[in-house]
Amino acid sequence: MSRMIALLGWIVVPLVLVGPTSVLAQASAGGSQVVPDRAAEPIPPGTVITMQNWQRYQQFMPEGMQALFEGKYGWKMPSDVSLEVGPTVIHPLPHNYLAATEKYAAQVQIEELPDGGLTLHNYQGGIPFPNPQEPHKGWKILANLWYRYMPHLSVISYADGCMVDHYGSISCNAAEIVERQLAFNTDPGIPATIPGSEGKFVTQWLMVLEPEQLRYAANLYISYADLSKPDDQFAFIPALRRYQPISTLARCSPSHDTDATPEELREGFDSNLTQVTAELVGEKKMLSLVDINLPQGRFPQDFDMPLGWPKPSWGKWQLRDVDVLSVSKLPAYASGYCYGKRVLYIDRQFAAPLWEDLYDAQMQPWKFMGLFLKTCNVPQIGPVNSCGALVWSYWDVKNTHATFFVDPDAAHPIYTNEEAPREYDDLVRYTTAPGLNEIMR
């Protein structure tokens, strides 16, 4: 699981969709912007896409979505599927984040490693590559995703996770999630590096709330500022009342019996950047569901069944500019790895993944993952697309089961930055392995 908020007023201005080449200009935009309703738009706002006309618009869909419409697998679009297209809304990136980009981006350097991998040096905040070019353009776009803006603190008090097995049976759990960025911060009043963070970049603390037999089971995931340092993962075992480290070899293991793995943390991608190759497959306009209304009730309520597809009540689809990346492990790290490749569809404006197609070691389709984002109104920042609030859906087309995370569910809040209750300022409890031992005390 990863991570409700009212949208700020929109200013309607005549502009084209903003990409990474012009993000610095957003600082003076003065508010969210709506691409105007023009007949020249590829899909005019108000268009409704259904089973009867979807082929007319398939070029604006990721391959996994096309496969669901085609009915190629056990998972397929419901007959009443309806995607209403609305205007494309651009929420400007935070002023401080863009200022850091302008100040530091020119000094970021790429180093080619002996094993064929890449790393970077001199990154201090903002977008590392605001205008990515060859060589290594694909990897630069992936680095922009890795360092995209997110609030320095995100707390989800109650997140739902529901699994559908091969027979259609549904089981659910719930968790509390705390994500914190400890390095390269640009939020107002927050140190770039949090004192006492010991070289950490991002941590995610997750504790199971339901069902009762799993209550208090918890995990802590740690990513480091040094890209070459492998992530750490720790688990708290309630029966033992203590934590234990988890081998890095377990990063392909499903998390809490879901279809997700630790490789998809941080809203869809949490793999070691120095161990992957990233190829830019192309650029396209893609139908995406951002600025959503969270589904009401617990799954399967407010989902279009049996697929578990978003209902029209979630909101209107937007036509977003995306970079399509194919990411795979370098040969030295590929043996035993779960995925042959993952294809990410990355929003060019705020650099988060909006959809992923995951392939097995034989390069056959395995999972399709839709990431449907909820906009947060972050204090002192404004509306933010990538904030930890989203619905993400896994459809395993090899084994015909699925997982749906709602972070948070509609009845519970997400807290960002200074909205969070003071108890979440406890760095030992929420960002260190020994802090896991405080769970049942």
Image: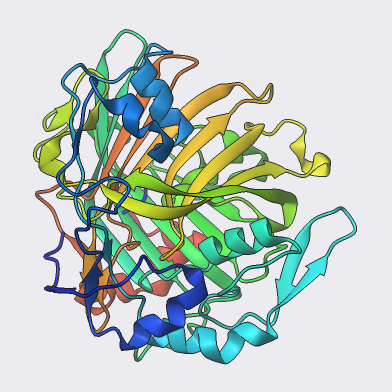
Is residue 119 rendered to the left or right of residue 73?
Answer: right
- Residue 240: image quadrant is top left
Q: In which quarter of the image is residue 11?
A: bottom left
Residue 233 place in picture, x, y as percent: 55, 51
Work out whether residue 109 can be spotted: yes
The answer to whether residue 192 is visible is no
Q: Is residue 123 left or right of residue 316?
A: right
* 52 relative to 311, above or below: above
> What residue occupies the far right of the structure in this picture?
114
In the image, 334: left or right of 230? right
Q: Which residue is drawn at 67% across and 32% down?
A: 340
**What colouring method underlies this structural image?**
rainbow
Foreground: 430 or 359? 359
Q: Classify 423 as above or below 346.
A: below
Residue 108 x, y percent position in the rendering:
68, 80
| Residue 388 position by quadrant | bottom left
Horizontal and vertical percent for residue 397?
45, 18
Residue 427 or residue 97, whichever sits in front: 97
Looking at the picture, tell me which residue is in the foreground, 146 or 98: 98
Q: Residue furthest top?
A: 167
Percent x, y of residue 87 = 21, 56
Which residue sits furthest front?
40
In this rendering, position of residue 411 left or right of residue 430: left
Q: How many labels does the image show?
A: 0
| 235 vs 91: above or below | above
Quadrant occupied by the N terminus: top left
Q: In which quarter of the image is the C terminus?
A: bottom left
